[in-house]
Amino acid sequence: MQTSSKILDTAVEQLSSLPGIGKRSALRLALNLLQRNELEIHDFANSIINLKLNLLNCEECGNISDNSTCKICANPGRDSEILCVIEYIRDIIAVESTGVFKGKYHVLGGVISPMDGIGPNDLNIDPLIQKAQNQKIKEVVFALSPTMEGDTTNFYLYKKLKPYPILITTLSRGVTVGAELHYADELSLGRSITQRQKYSSE
């Protein structure tokens, strides 16, 4: 899809590179931006630049943060003895939207997937084991997507954590098998967290 302006075409090309944005949607967005005043465009562009250059990862859990420690880890009201293990930052957002989990998180950065060339060493696993060794953690909740890769990762983590006196639980199967966690509706995900079960490797 080309227009009479190379500048507009370039903007459309960049916008369509975003997930879920086709060329027609990108063109609508670009034309909408054209209708905004310079100050609005300046603020819009700066927010994107600021997102990339200044957003940090929490040193404790890996969540996104404006500071070295995210608001969740810094909150004294959260239960530091319960740790929820998730794949990606977007899964923290999904779990937090339920309002039922009051512990803290650990972001793995993915799941074990040999087909994609992702092994245990490619994930944020060692810091999790160190937390189990050095901190007073009474429960680790596996909240990975209920896929084959998620189950494989759960089993690997279970073997690594088994030597420690920690209760290991997993979400109840209220979340559809094969679906990614962040696509689950809040009610089902909240119920799965509340009704979590002791993890079984069998």
Image (cartoon, rainbow, N blue to C red):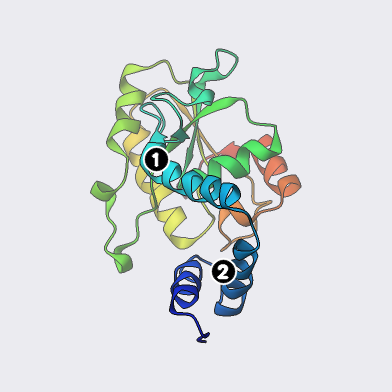
Image spot of residue 183 (x, y percent): 63, 56
Q: Does 157 sit above or below residue 60?
A: below
Q: Secondary structure at mark 1?
A: helix
Q: Is 106 positioned to the left or the right of 1 in the image?
A: left
Q: Is residue 196 visible?
A: no
Q: Which mark is residue 158?
A: 1
Q: Is 80 positioned to the left or the right of 95 in the image?
A: left
Image spot of residue 50 (x, y percent): 43, 41
Q: Quadrant of residue 7?
A: bottom left
Q: Does 8 sit above or below residue 65?
A: below
Closer to the eye: label 1 or 2: 2
Image spot of residue 110 (x, y percent): 39, 51
Pointer 1 or 2: first along the chain: 2
Seen from the viewer's position, the closer of residues 43 and 130 is 43
Q: Is residue 192 visible?
A: yes
Seen from the viewer's position, the closer of residues 186 and 173 is 186
Residue at which label 2 appears: 20
Q: Residue placed at 44% from the left, 25% from the top?
A: 166
